Image: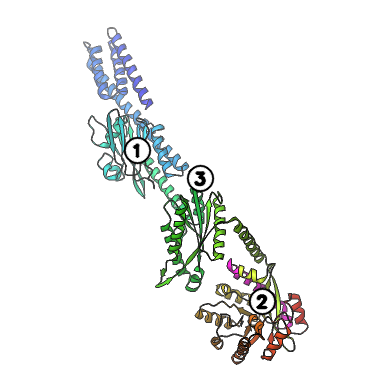
């Protein structure tokens, strides 16, 4: 240390001056000469050490006091002065060494508070040990952090190294060379062995070296060394320090260094915990691959890397086909296992430098660094094959395929968000065209942009409640009596457009819930006209919703409505027969009436009518149109009416638009009708006037 050198220099100068003065006054004032020699002995003892101070005191006593009667007393005083100088020197130097360790402790505290990276923290500590605390060398050795960070060095003697992997570290001076490994078994053969067990260790270096770690420190100008354990849960790490002073690393300094090691370990643990938390926030908990947030965070860095090297990349948007059928039919637990297997296959297909993520639901994405077009095509082919392989879950085998959309960087965009949007658009184009893969096409994107705008508008209309409900009367003929009303949703787009769209984008239940709410509100207002019946069309997704039954029970009770005032028209899509029976019986048990919509189109067979609790059957419009043109159509229509009559279920002929169709149906024995021949669907106010006139 600089202050150590200055003290040594001034001690030698003052000691020499005191001895010269003692020689000068010896002939005249022997007692003064003795006192001056004692001061010189103290100065030499302070500047060097007790041994040299003792030697100088003996010489001084002999020169200045020989022949005088008090020379033994003067000699004793000189000896005591030399020893006192050495003691004071030791204490002063111990305080300096302890302050040096405290300076390092402060630097560790600052670094742990300010640095947010393990490598940067270790680098800051070893640099501070040399540049701020004044140690000749600082090494971090062993299993530190989550590296590996490699080895760093700065020219000796003011050097510092980081060693966090299995590579050795070495020092050179002229033709000399020394090195040591950072492995615990190698460090156990050095003076650092106690530090591996959690105790600080120190050694003063003699004339003969005893281990390779000592050799390394010697080459950097060190005369003493210390090994300080860095205590933390996930590794064994040592901070090795060298000092020029042989008297360094006394107990006070070692205690401060041990505290610095403990604080450094806490800093490493904190950074590792933050890293683990960040990893969790970037990871999909179900599949273990990246989630949307992690994909965007790391994807941006990957694109920056590709751009720096003027490379290319491809973003692949992956949507699983038929997964919802598996999930709905077999339950979410089995569906989750299928998703985990899909994620494993995707992870196996991509390279280590590429990214794969689950964006949500059954949608995944991969970001690839593209070297050649053929390589991208090969990846897409492997991806399709892997997804198409059967999935074995719960003793059963399931089959999936996927629609893939691809956007290229930088051709289709330079921002990850833009690439993802365009890959998503390409995926939709592939799905609608029945293809496995589609690359982004600007013209196709324009059409999809219109579709996305329509989706957003529909979602906003459902959320704001601006979907209108109109009422189509079901009439008994002759007489024109209204048996019930069918509630129909109306919007800016025709029903054949927006109703299927709501199902595709997951808003089927939201749309049906809105219609049900408006119908129930209307039924509550219409109770003054008796107890009219209104039917509402439900999608298969709404029937499968866990919210359906609680909603119906709550809303009917809240309004004081009898369940029999509401009828549900069930869709034509087929679903599991056992679940269908349970669902229909539960609805019937509530008191809600049931209508088979488009009977014969897939929901219920003729043989099941007698076993399921339906109130109405609707003969589909397609069959009504064929009457008079097909003998088979008339036979089926007559059979449906007869079946309903025997089962006690009323049959409604829907979509009647002409007098000829009405006459044919009357001849076949039909008595309930709805269609434009009797009038278009009407607004709620018109339907209420019809009720008020007593037609219901």
| Residue toward you, 383 or 605 | 383
> Which residue is found at the position 25% from the left and 17% from the top?
74
Query: Along the polypeptide, which appears first: circle 3 or circle 1?
Result: 1
User: Where is mark 1, residue-wise?
Assistant: 139
Of marks 3 and 1, the one in the foreground: 3
**Residue 395 magenta-highlighted:** no
Q: Which sits earlier in the primary sequence, circle 2 or circle 1? A: 1
- The 10 Å Cα crowd at callout 3, few under 14, some 14 to 19, many 20 or more, is some
Q: Alpha carbon of mark 3 to alpha carbon of mark 1: how far?
A: 37 Å
Q: Which quarter of the rendered picture does the N terminus lie within?
A: top left
Residue at 54% in and 62% down: 430
Answer few, some or many: residues within 10 Å of disc 2's Cα (few below 14, many 20 plus, some between 14 and 19).
Answer: few
**Up-down relation of residue 82 to residue 260 (above or below):** above
Using residue 627 as the reference point, say whether residue 178 is left or right of it. Answer: left
Quarter of the rendering occupied by the C terminus: bottom right
x and y percent of residue 58 in the render?
Answer: 23, 18
The part of the chain drawn in magenta is 502-531
Marks 2 and 1 sit apart, C-alpha to C-alpha, by: 78 Å
Residue 282 shows in this picture: yes
Residue at the disc numbered 3: 307
Q: Is residue 680 shown above or below 383?
A: below
Residue 690 sits above or below residue 398 on the image: below
Mark 2 — residue? Answer: 559
The answer to the question of whether label 3 and label 1 lie on touching residues, with beta carbons closer than 8 A, is no
When asked about the image quadrant of residue 628, the answer is bottom right
Q: Disc 3 vs disc 2: which is toward the camera?
A: 3
User: Residue 448 location in percent, x, y?
Assistant: 61, 60
Task: Label 3: state its secondary structure.
Answer: helix
Q: Which residue is drawn at 29% across and 18% down?
A: 38
| Residue 556 image position (x, y, % from top left) | 64, 77
Specify whether 64 is left or right of 110.
left
Could you tell me if the residues under marks 3 and 2 are in contact, i.e. CB atoms within 8 Å?
no
């Amino acid at each position: 240390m600089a202050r150590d050198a200055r003290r040594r220099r001034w001690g030698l100068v003052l000691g020499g001056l005191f001895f010269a003065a003692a020689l000068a006054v010896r002939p005249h004032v022997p007692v003064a000469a003795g006192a001056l020699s004692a001061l010189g002995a103290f100065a030499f003892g302070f500047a060097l050490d007790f041994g040299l101070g003792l030697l100088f005191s003996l010489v001084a006593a002999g020169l200045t006091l020989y022949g005088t009667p008090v020379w033994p007393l003067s000699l004793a005083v000189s000896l005591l002065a030399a020893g006192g100088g050495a003691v004071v020197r030791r204490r002063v130097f111990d305080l300096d060494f302890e302050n040096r360790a405290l300076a390092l402790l402060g630097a560790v505290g600052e670094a742990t508070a300010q640095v947010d990276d393990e490598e940067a923290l270790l680098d800051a500590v070893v640099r501070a040990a040399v540049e701020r605390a004044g140690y000749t060398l600082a090494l971090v050795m062993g299993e530190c952090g989550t590296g590996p960070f490699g080895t760093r060095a700065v020219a000796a003697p003011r050097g510092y190294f980081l060693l966090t992997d299995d590579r050795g570290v070495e020092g050179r001076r002229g033709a000399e060379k020394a090195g040591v490994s950072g492995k615990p078994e190698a460090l156990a053969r050095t003076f650092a062995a106690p530090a591996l067990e959690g105790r600080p260790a120190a050694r003063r270096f003699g004339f003969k070296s005893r281990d390779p770690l000592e050799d390394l420190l010697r080459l950097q100008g060190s005369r003493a060394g210390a090994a300080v354990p860095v205590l933390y849960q996930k590794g064994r790490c040592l901070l090795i320090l060298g000092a020029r002073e042989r008297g360094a690393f006394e107990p006070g300094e070692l205690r401060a260094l041990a505290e610095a090691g403990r604080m450094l370990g806490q800093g490493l643990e904190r950074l590792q915990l933050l890293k683990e938390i960040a990893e969790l926030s970037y990871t999909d908990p179900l599949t273990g691959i990246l989630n949307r947030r992690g994909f965007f965070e790391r994807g941006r860095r990957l694109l920056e890397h590709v751009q720096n090297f003027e490379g290319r990349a491809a973003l692949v948007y992956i949507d699983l086909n038929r997964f919802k059928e598996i999930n709905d039919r077999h339950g979410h637990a089995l569906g989750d296992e299928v998703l985990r297997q899909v994620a494993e296959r995707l992870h196996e297909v991509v390279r280590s430098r590429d990214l794969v993520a689950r964006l949500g639901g059954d949608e995944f994405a991969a970001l690839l660094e593209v070297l050649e077009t053929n390589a991208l095509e090969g990846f897409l082919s492997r991806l399709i094959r892997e997804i198409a392989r059967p999935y074995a879950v719960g003793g059963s085998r399931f089959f999936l395929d996927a629609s893939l959309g691809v956007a290229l960087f930088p051709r289709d965009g330079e921002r990850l968000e833009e690439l993802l949007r365009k890959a998503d658009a390409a995926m939709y184009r592939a799905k609608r065209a029945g293809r496995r893969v589609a690359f982004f096409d600007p013209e196709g994107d324009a059409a999809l942009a219109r579709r996305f705008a329509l989706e957003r508008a529909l979602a906003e209309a459902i959320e704001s409640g601006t979907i209108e409900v109109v009422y189509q009367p079901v009439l008994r003929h002759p007489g024109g009596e209204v048996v019930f009303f069918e509630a129909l949703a109306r919007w800016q787009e025709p029903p054949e457009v927006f109703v299927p769209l709501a199902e595709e984008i997951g808003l089927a239940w939201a749309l049906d819930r809105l219609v049900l709410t408006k119908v129930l509100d209307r039924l509550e207002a219409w109770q003054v006209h008796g107890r009219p019946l209104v039917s509402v069309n439900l999608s298969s997704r709404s029937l499968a919703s866990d919210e359906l039954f609680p909603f119906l029970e709550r809303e009917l009770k809240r309004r004081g409505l009898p369940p029999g005032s509401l009828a549900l028209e069930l869709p034509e899509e087929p679903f599991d027969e056992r679940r269908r029976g349970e669902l229909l019986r539960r609805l019937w048990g509530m008191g809600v009436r049931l209508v088979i919509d488009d009977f014969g189109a897939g929901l219920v067979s003729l043989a099941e009518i007698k076993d399921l609790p339906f109130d109405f059957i609707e003969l589909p419009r397609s069959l009504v149109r064929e009457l008079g043109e097909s003998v088979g159509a008339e036979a089926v229509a007559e059979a449906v009416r007869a079946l309903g009559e025997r089962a006690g279920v009323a049959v409604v002929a829907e979509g009647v638009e002409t007098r000829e169709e009405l006459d044919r149906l009357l001849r076949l024995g039909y008595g309930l009708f709805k269609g434009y021949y009797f009038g278009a669907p009407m607004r709620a106010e018109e339907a209420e006037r019809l009720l008020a006139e007593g037609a219901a």
